Amino acid sequence: MSEEQPRERPVARAEADTSRCVSSGQCAVTAPLVFDQDEAGQVVVLAAEPGARAAELARQAAAMCPASAIRVYPVS
């Protein structure tokens, strides 16, 4: 029997505006635990409230997004 890994405490909120998405895929490459793409290439948020490690990658993905379609906010 395998032990379940404890879930990391969320430190951010990741959101994506699909109306702005230009399907570059930078988000999915940079933060694959947080973002993916659907069949049409549009951004999909996989983890809306990532932990610290994934949130840092999500912030990098937001900075790299050519359409500014991604926002990452701190959670309180």
Image (cartoon, helix red, strand yellow):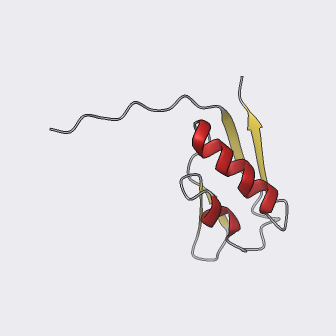
Image location of residue 5, percent across then percent down: 35, 35
- Kindly identify the residue that appears in the image at 61 percent across and 64 percent down: 28
Image location of residue 1, percent across then percent down: 14, 38
Relative to residue 47, is residue 67 depicted above or below? below
* Quadrant in the picture for residue 35: bottom right
Looking at the picture, tell me which residue is in the foreground, 56 or 45.
Answer: 56
* Quadrant in the picture for residue 13: top right
Relative to residue 33, is residue 56 depicted above or below? above
Q: Residue furthest top?
A: 76
Image location of residue 71, percent across then percent down: 78, 48
- Kindly identify the residue that appears in the image at 73 percent across and 53 percent down: 60
Q: Please indicate whether residue 37 sits to the left or right of residue 74 in the image.
A: left
Which image quarter is the C terminus in? top right
- Kindly identify the residue that appears in the image at 59 percent across and 42 percent down: 53
Q: Residue furthest bottom?
A: 40
Image location of residue 51, percent across then percent down: 57, 36
Q: Is residue 50 visible?
A: no
Q: Is residue 62 visible?
A: yes
- Kindly identify the residue that appears in the image at 64 percent across and 61 percent down: 30
Q: Please indicate whether residue 64 sits to the left or right of residue 52 in the image.
A: right
Looking at the picture, tell me which residue is in the foreground, 6 or 20.
Answer: 6
Q: Please indicate whether residue 59 sits to the left or right of residue 39 in the image.
A: right
* Quadrant in the picture for residue 75: top right
Relative to residue 26, is residue 46 depicted above or below? above
Relative to residue 39, is residue 74 depicted above or below? above
